[in-house]
Image: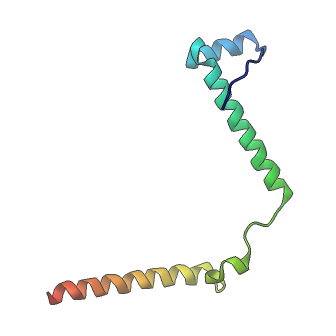
Amino acid sequence: MGAARAHIVFPKELMAEIDAQVGPRGRSAFLAELAKKEINRRKLLAFLERGEVIWKDEDHPELAEGSYKWVRSLRDDWDKRVDEKFAQSDGE
């Protein structure tokens, strides 16, 4: 990504606080990072305000009977595999 210069005016007190945190040579990187975070935050808020549905039940049939049953099945499968592994090691 290329860089561009911008003339930005800050209150003296704010600039002193920024310098105290990152030093005068760290201003650009610090302000660029803050600007990027703020842009991402605003994009996220705009997305959330649209109320768009992103989770569709038909895309997750494994959860049709509820997340509890799905998690329970994962745990049961894990327990079964562990039991089988221990049974194999006992027979060796």
Q: Residue at x 57, y 80 (%)?
A: 68
User: What is the x, y in percent for residue 45?
Assistant: 78, 48
| Quadrant of the snapshot with the N terminus | top right
| Nearer to us in this view, 60 or 78 | 60
In the picture as drawn, the residue positioned furthest to the top comes out as 12
**Quadrant of the snapshot with the C terminus:** bottom left
Q: Residue at x 43, y 84 (%)?
A: 77
- Residue found at x 22% / y 87%: 88
Depicted 15 relative to depicted 55: above or below: above
Instruction: Please tell me which residue lies in front, 58 or 18.
Output: 58
Residue 84 quadrant: bottom left
51 shown above or below 55: above
**Rendered location of residue 71, percent (x, y):** 53, 78
Color theme of the render: rainbow
| Image height of 53 relative to 57, above or below | above
Residue 15 at x, y percent in the picture: 68, 13
Labels in figure, total: 0
| Residue 78: percent from left, percent from top | 40, 80
**Furthest residue to the left?**
92
Image quadrant where residue 14 sits: top right
Name the side, left or right, on which 62 lies relative to 84: right
Residue drawn 79% across the image and 67% down it: 53
Q: Which residue is most to the right?
A: 50
